[in-house]
Image: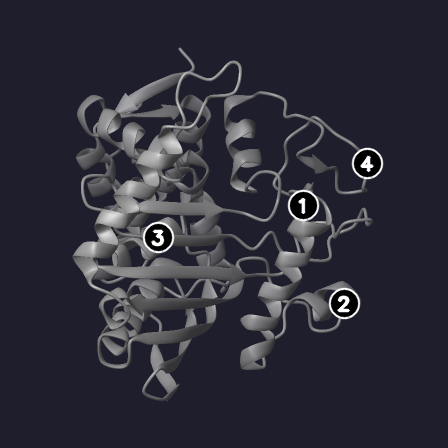
Amino acid sequence: MNEITVDPGILRGFTAEIFAAAGMSPADAEIEADVLVWANLRGVDSHGVLRIPWYIKNVDDGVFNPKPNIRIERETVATILIEGDQAFGPIVTVFAMDKVMEKAREAGVCWGIIRNTTHQGAMAYYALKAAEKGMAGIISVCSPPNMAPFGARAKGVHNSPISVAVPANKYDPLVLDMATSVVAGGKLSLAEDKGVEIPPEWSLDPKGNSTTIPSFDNILLPVGGPKGSGLALMFETLSSVMVGNPLLERNVVGQNPTPRGLQNSFLMAIDISAFTDLNEYRANIDALIDAQKSLRMAEGFEEIMVPGEPEFRIQAQREKGGIPLPIGTVENIRPIASRFGVDMPFGE
């Protein structure tokens, strides 16, 4: 048996116990657990509980701060800068998205930047918070280099993911969540846990050579060649450089390199009702989805799906039937549970 199936509630409770034992407040530990298990529920296992050992290592190394001093440093009617103090990404990003939505209710829009956060998990979690409130949500992130710019075979940009979500009516929200690399880096870790090879177009080995062997240290390749790496470079200008905390250049030239895991993030909320009737907007999004689904299908396809739809379907299945975890993931988590004295209620 290569995997086991775990009840989502049990997995969420276990994960929260781990992070509380690692020094987080119970409330923060629950947020962290919810974000990771939510990713597993939606089939985004690369951003789920397989991250637990890496997160704990980063706490040990002083990169992730379980007890941060999160604070607002600058704000206007429609902008906000939040210092994350190396908080676990989900903790400061939930805080930030709530603040951005609050300001958007007053100003119509709000642009926020988080400085000095850490890995935020699946970005759609935060964009959907806005969609669920009748807003459009946008979020992206930049971290130290892990991807080769088009034409290079060394790390020079980050595979900065971006998520955009908008509400519908009869349909689930439309939500795009994508990295600027061919695949998210976590998919290499997932392949490691599963003990499988990867396609050669996903990444290069640490020396810049083509490889089918998955490793967290591989050099990711940009999706769409210059388009993916171009977007990644511009996202750095809108996040890290914007708040005087550049991450790419200093790591490329080796001056005061930033530990992998530290990042800066920009996010935005748009109050749809400031521009149009919200109910009419929702109806128009439904009509847009209907139009996409009515198109003549390409050969080999049985259905045209819109962004977010596959994940919503997987979530419905896993909420009822449980979350499959590779044995490799379970075995990587086991020493962490033992270290903190947390009972592991699965994988026995």
Q: Amino acid at mark 2?
A: Gly
Where does label 4 land, which residue? 209
Q: Earlier in the sequence, mark 4 or mark 2?
A: 4
Mark 3 nearby-residue class (10 Å; few <14, some 14–19, many ≥20): many
* Mark closer to the observer (2, 1): 1
Task: State yes or no: discs 1 and 4 in contact (Cβ < 8 Å).
Answer: no
Q: Position of residue 341 (x, y in %)?
A: 27, 43
Q: Nearer the viewer, residue 82 or 86?
A: 82
Q: Earlier in the sequence, mark 3 or mark 4?
A: 3
Residue 315 vs 92, above or below: the answer is above
Q: Earlier in the sequence, mark 3 or mark 2?
A: 3
Is 183 positioned to the left or the right of 57 in the image? right
Q: Earlier in the sequence, mark 1 or mark 4?
A: 4
The quarter of the image holding the C terminus is top left
Q: Amino acid at mark 3?
A: Ala
Task: State yes or no: discs 4 and 2 in contact (Cβ < 8 Å).
Answer: no
Q: Residue at x 71, y 28 (%)?
A: 200
Q: Position of residue 344 (x, y in %)?
A: 26, 33
Disc 4 element: loop
Is 122 positioned to the left or the right of 246 in the image? left
Where does label 3 land, which residue? 165
